[in-house]
């Protein structure tokens, strides 16, 4: 059975006290985690050690939202994968559409980030997804295929197997527009078929593919019920503990 994952992406939100309060609220309200389900909080770098301290003793994992391509050196302002690992971080979001758009991260740069994350035992939550115009033009599946091919499909099966994929249609992020279950299932199934073709159907069946984009308590249950949707990457709704916990309990 594939691992189910619900990851919160806090993005650039919270300050020190509200980050601690939010992590505490999630920990306290999440009385039990559904079976075979991993819960992850991907928080701003500066809050990692405080959030990790709050989550210690719970099964909730700590994640980051980015890392740099190099392990160390003269890269003012960047944060490396070895640094994250030294704080006990287990997951890192890579290739989020906001990083692709505002920070011009290319598929080739993301391939380097995936490499260094894996070398440091971080699990990449690798985001793919099309913009509105690409969906309207009917090229959404080939756009996602290209993202996978250029950033991930050079990996050995052993390394690829460690990746979590998140399908986040860009037009659904923070807009209140959610992919329909048919749209989500179509893409998740297409991604699984791409993996089967490149690697094997066994690997394709075992990779977790999350949905992200205006996922909330009201729609999580129907999205998670799709055969190829293994959980969610949650933005706005992860900033309210009760909503995030309700989403975790939607399996
Ligand atoms: P929203 O849930 O706010 O649409 O954000 C989704 C997202 O970008 C998660 O990474």
Image (tube, rainbow, N blue to C red):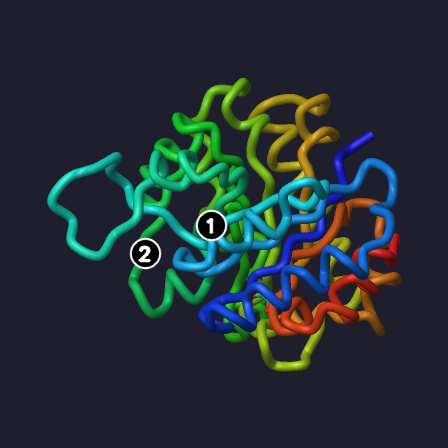
How far from the left and from the top, in percent, is residue 108?
31, 43
> Judging from the image, what secondary structure is the residue with disc 1 in?
helix
Give the position of the N terminus as an image quadrant: top right
Residue at the image point whose x is 78% and y is 41% from the top: 37
State how many labels appear: 2
How far from the left and from the top, in percent, is residue 12?
45, 70
**Nearer to me, 48 or 224:** 48
Label 1 sits on residue: 49
- In the rendered structure, the answer to whether residue 208 lies left or right of residue 251 reads left
Q: Are marks 1 and 2 in contact (CB under 8 Å)?
A: no
Distance from mark 2 CB to nearest ligand 1 atom below 8 Å: no
For the view shown, which residue lies furthest in the left direction?
74
Tell me which label, 1 or 2, sits earlier in the chain.
Answer: 1
> Judging from the image, what secondary structure is the residue with disc 2 in?
loop
Q: CA distance from mark 1 to mark 2?
A: 26 Å
- In the rendered structure, the answer to whether residue 78 lies left or right of residue 36 reads left
Crowd tier of the residue under label 2, counting other residues whose Cα lies within 10 Å: few below 14, some 14–19, many 20 or above: some
Q: Is residue 206 above or below residue 132?
A: above
Q: Is residue 80 above or below residue 24?
A: above
Label 2 sits on residue: 105
**Nearer to me, 192 or 197:** 192
Query: Whereabouts is ligand 1, in terms of quadrant?
Result: bottom right
Splitting the image into 4 quarters, where does residue 170 fall?
A: bottom right
**Nearer to me, 18 or 122:** 18
Query: Which is in the foreground here, disc 1 or disc 2?
Result: 1
> Can the viewer see residue 232?
yes
Q: Which mark is residue 130?
A: none
């Amino acid at each position: 059975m594939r691992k189910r994952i619900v990851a919160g992406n806090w993005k650039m939100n919270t300050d020190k006290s509200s980050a601690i309060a939010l992590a505490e609220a999630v920990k306290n309200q999440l009385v039990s985690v559904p079976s075979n389900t991993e819960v992850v909080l991907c928080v701003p770098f500066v809050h990692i050690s405080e959030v990790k301290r709050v989550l210690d003793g719970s099964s909730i994992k700590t994640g980051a939202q980015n890392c740099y391509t190099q392990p160390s050196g003269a890269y003012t302002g960047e944060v490396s994968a070895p640094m994250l690992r030294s704080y006990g971080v287990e997951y890192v979001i890579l290739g989020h559409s906001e990083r692709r758009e505002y920070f011009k991260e290319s598929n080739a740069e993301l391939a380097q980030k995936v490499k260094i994350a894996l070398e440091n035992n971080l699990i990449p939550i690798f985001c793919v997804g099309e913009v509105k115009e690409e969906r309207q033009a009917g090229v959404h599946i080939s756009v996602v295929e290209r993202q996978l091919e250029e950033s991930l499909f050079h990996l050995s099966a052993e390394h690829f197997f460690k990746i979590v994929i998140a399908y986040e249609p860009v037009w659904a992020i923070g807009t209140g527009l959610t992919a329909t279950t048919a749209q989500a299932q179509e893409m998740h199934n297409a991604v699984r078929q791409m993996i089967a073709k490149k690697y094997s159907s066994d690997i394709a069946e075992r990779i977790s593919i999350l949905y992200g984009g205006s996922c909330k308590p009201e729609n999580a249950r129907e999205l998670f019920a799709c055969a190829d949707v293994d959980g969610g990457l949650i933005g706005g709704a992860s900033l309210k503990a009760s909503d995030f916990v309700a989403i975790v309990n939607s399996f």
